[in-house]
């Protein structure tokens, strides 16, 4: 959402945009809102406007155009625990086939009709701003954008479903949209895209249907609940760490990803502007210290063994460490900056 700023700040933004416009010889889109923070001035683009033979592209929620990973492979950012637990799951005889059998055409149809009937499908003509966030995130990760639905719910959540090789879809709850900034919401979409990029597929859908309340799916709920064993939960937790990395590749700022985790741990719209990312990271380090003893290690395992996601403080610590790693820096060096002007 655009906000009003004082004349000098607005003048600064206008001069920067004006220089770009004059250098290219074309006018910038009219739908550009300006926002500011304590550290920097940024501009929020609401789309692209065709001018002559070119399309002028305004970055979304960024001071500069994002980096684009044209040749990105899933293993370039896959978490080591994800690799390890994926191998363990594949070693379980018949698990993949069993999952596909349970999540067959009937279940697929139920989930599809459920979303079409109770959610809003995002497109260029429906919630176009949100659609732009998804498309840009998919472009950065070099993956085809799936369908996106917005669903009314007081529980902040987002999840991905992909069944039987059909076009997958992401579902985002309205309360999550209200809780997060635009940059944070795009990081969430990138996290979900990470599941698709890494082909988490059947196992992810298998787990998501259970955690969403599998008992509501006729004839399959109890069977799915009994089948989601400790190894599948362990894999799912490690897969979440991988997808947090995908979120960072799109956000390209670790504080954006950590802020999402902090808000999911204890945020609400009325206090969101008072939350402190650095304090949350310090909290994560204190948790590591408190759980380093034998008793702490036991309690920590008991806390997490039945969870579908790692604890928020652990995810925050993991993404903070990876953002300073040689692996992440190498990926950034390989990337290309998205051009602000593209041929139509």
Image: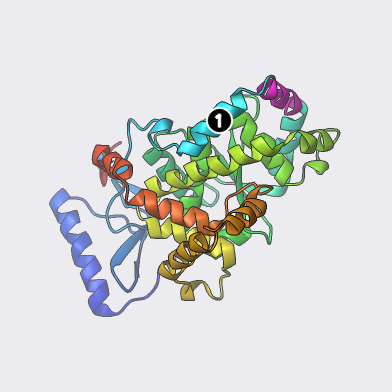
Seen at 45% across and 49% down, the residue is 133
Q: Where is residue 100 in the image (x, y as percent from the top left)?
A: 69, 24
User: Residue 71: which quarter of the image?
Assistant: top left
Which structural element holds mark 1?
helix
Quadrant where the image shows the N terminus: bottom left
Q: Position of residue 198 (x, y in %)?
A: 49, 33
Image height of 208 relative to 187, above or below: above
Residue assigned mark 1:
86
Which residues, given as a range, are shown in magenta? 94-105
- As drawn, is 203 to the left or to the right of 245? right
Quadrant where the image shows the C terminus: top left
How many other residues sit within 10 Å of disc 1, few (<14), some (14-19) or many (≥20)? many
Seen at 39% across and 60% down, the residue is 255
Given residues 53 and 74, the one toward you in this image is: 74
Can residue 139 be seen here? The reply is yes
Can residue 129 be seen here? The reply is no
Residue farthest toward the left in the current orientation of the protein: 23
Seen at 69% across and 43% down, the residue is 115
Q: Position of residue 6 (x, y in %)?
A: 30, 80
Given residues 177 and 263, the one toward you in this image is: 263
Q: Per the image, is 99 magenta? A: yes
Main secondary structure type of the part rendered in magenta: helix
- As drawn, is 12 to the left or to the right of 108? left
Seen at 58% across and 44% down, the residue is 237
Image height of 173 relative to 267, above or below: above
- As drawn, is 174 to the left or to the right of 102? left
Q: Where is residue 186 in the image (x, y as percent from the top left)?
A: 46, 52
How many marks the image carries: the answer is 1
Q: Per the image, is 240 magenta? A: no
Image height of 182 relative to 26, above or below: below
Given residues 318 and 5, the one toward you in this image is: 318
Given residues 91 and 273, the one toward you in this image is: 91
């Amino acid at each position: 959402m655009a906000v009003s700023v004082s004349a000098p700040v607005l003048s600064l933004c206008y001069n920067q945009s004006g220089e770009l416009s004059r250098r290219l010889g074309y006018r910038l889109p009219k739908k550009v809102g300006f926002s500011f923070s304590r550290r920097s001035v940024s501009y929020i683009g609401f789309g692209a406007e065709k001018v002559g033979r070119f399309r002028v592209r305004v970055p979304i929620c960024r001071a500069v155009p994002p980096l684009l990973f044209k040749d990105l492979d899933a293993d370039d950012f896959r978490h080591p625990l994800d690799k390890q637990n994926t191998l363990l799951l594949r070693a379980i005889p018949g698990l993949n086939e069993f999952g596909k059998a349970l999540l067959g055409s009937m279940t697929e149809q139920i989930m599809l009709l459920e979303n079409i009937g109770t959610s809003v499908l995002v497109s260029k003509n429906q919630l176009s701003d949100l659609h732009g966030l998804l498309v840009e995130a998919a472009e950065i990760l070099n993956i085809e954008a799936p369908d996106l639905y917005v669903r009314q719910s007081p529980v902040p959540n987002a999840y991905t479903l992909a069944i039987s090789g059909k076009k997958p879809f992401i579902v985002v709850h309205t309360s999550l949209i209200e809780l997060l900034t635009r940059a944070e919401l795009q990081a969430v979409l990138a996290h979900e895209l990470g599941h698709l990029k890494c082909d988490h597929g059947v196992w992810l859908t298998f787990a998501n249907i259970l955690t969403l309340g599998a008992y509501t799916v006729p004839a399959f709920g109890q069977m799915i609940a009994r089948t989601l064993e400790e190894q599948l939960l362990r894999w799912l937790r490690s897969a979440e760490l991988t997808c947090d990395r995908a979120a960072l590749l799109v956000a390209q700022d670790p504080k954006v990803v950590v802020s999402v985790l902090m808000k999911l741990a204890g945020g609400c719209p009325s206090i969101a502007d008072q939350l402190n990312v650095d304090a949350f990271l310090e909290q994560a380090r204190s948790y590591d210290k408190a759980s380093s003893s034998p008793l702490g290690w036991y309690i920590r395992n008991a806390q997490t063994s039945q969870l579908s996601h790692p604890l928020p403080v652990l995810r925050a610590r993991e993404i903070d460490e990876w953002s300073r790693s040689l692996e992440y820096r190498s990926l950034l060096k390989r990337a290309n900056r998205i051009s602000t002007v593209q041929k139509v």
